[in-house]
Image (cartoon, rainbow, N blue to C red):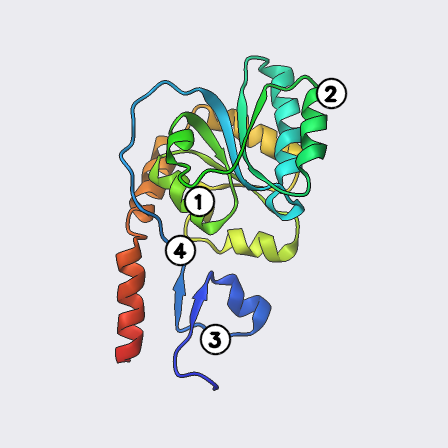
């Protein structure tokens, strides 16, 4: 091969890009203290307001959630090309969604939310570290495999439609403690020191 040792961020790389992975990493995050505070929002989305993150589907799902649970509240943290469209949709449907500009550290807003609407590897780790149920959206076969091959796949609520998101989101308001604890135990091992150790071992290989 062209290289002696390769790292892949996610197992889906082998299938979709034909790259042999000597080591698969999933990212890392700094662990934060879990605060026992009253939740301000039922659901949080954070990330780019773009098609691949599923923001539109999460917002449409929230409309369905609000129809059966009118007291529900959501916060969306981010920016992107779909910002005006989703804000207009929220206004027209009188949805209780607070739109927040991007923040450097999501931990405070995440800690005040009950369920995380996220589908990126780093945000999955961050949410698991705060013991939040996770609802993850996919819209392409590659994104489906991106999530389905994740070590936490069986504990994520992987969805491909706003109906599925709404169903899983409502169920997640009564979280499965076994899933939450399993996700937390895995996530707390995904540290930047662990990543550094993997690279150091590769150089010694």
| Contact (Cβ within 8 Å) of mark 4 with mark 2 | no
State which quarter of the image contains the C terminus: bottom left
Q: Which residue is mark 1?
A: 124
| Contact (Cβ within 8 Å) of mark 2 with mark 3 | no
Q: Is residue 95 visible?
A: yes
Q: Which residue is mark 3?
A: 20
Compare marks 1 and 2 and give the one earlier in the sequence.
Answer: 2
Q: Residues within 10 Å of mark 1 (few under 14, many from 20)?
A: many
Q: Is residue 6 above or below residue 184?
A: below
Q: Which residue is mark 4?
A: 27
Which secondary structure lies at badge 1? helix
Compare marks 2 and 3 and give the one earlier in the sequence.
Answer: 3
Compare marks 1 and 4 and give the one earlier in the sequence.
Answer: 4
Q: Is residue 74 above or below residue 202?
A: above
Which secondary structure lies at badge 2? helix
| Image coords of residue 196 (percent x, y) | 29, 64
| Contact (Cβ within 8 Å) of mark 1 with mark 2 | no
| Image coords of residue 80 (percent x, y) | 63, 42
Compare marks 1 and 3 and give the one earlier in the sequence.
Answer: 3
* Structural distance between the alpha carbons of marks 1 and 4: 10 Å
| Image coords of residue 6 (percent x, y) | 42, 75
* Structural distance between the alpha carbons of marks 2 and 3: 49 Å
Which secondary structure lies at badge 4? loop
Q: Which residue is mark 2?
A: 92
Q: Residues within 10 Å of mark 4 (few under 14, many from 20)?
A: some
| Image coords of residue 177 (percent x, y) | 35, 31
* Structural distance between the alpha carbons of marks 1 and 3: 25 Å
* Structural distance between the alpha carbons of marks 4 and 2: 38 Å
Compare marks 4 and 3 and give the one earlier in the sequence.
Answer: 3
């Amino acid at each position: 091969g062209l290289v002696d040792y390769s790292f892949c961020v996610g197992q889906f790389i082998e299938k979709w890009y034909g790259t042999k992975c000597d080591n698969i990493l999933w990212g890392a995050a700094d662990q934060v203290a879990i605060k026992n505070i009253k939740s301000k929002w039922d659901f949080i989305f954070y990330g780019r307001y773009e098609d691949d993150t599923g923001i539109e589907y999460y917002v449409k799902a929230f409309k369905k959630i609000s129809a059966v649970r009118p007291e529900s509240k959501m916060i969306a943290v981010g920016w992107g090309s779909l910002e005006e469209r989703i804000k207009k949709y929220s206004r027209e449907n009188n949805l209780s969604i607070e739109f927040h500009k991007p923040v450097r550290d999501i931990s405070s807003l995440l800690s005040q939310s009950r369920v995380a609407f996220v589908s990126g590897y780093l945000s999955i780790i961050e949410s698991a570290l705060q013991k939040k149920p996770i609802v993850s959206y996919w819209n392409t076969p590659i994104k489906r495999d991106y999530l389905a091959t994740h070590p936490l796949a069986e504990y994520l609520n992987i969805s491909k439609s706003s109906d599925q998101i709404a169903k899983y989101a409502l169920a997640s308001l009564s979280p499965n403690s076994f899933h939450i604890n399993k996700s937390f135990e895995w996530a707390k091992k995904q540290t930047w020191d662990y990543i550094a150790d993997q690279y150091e071992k590769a150089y010694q290989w």
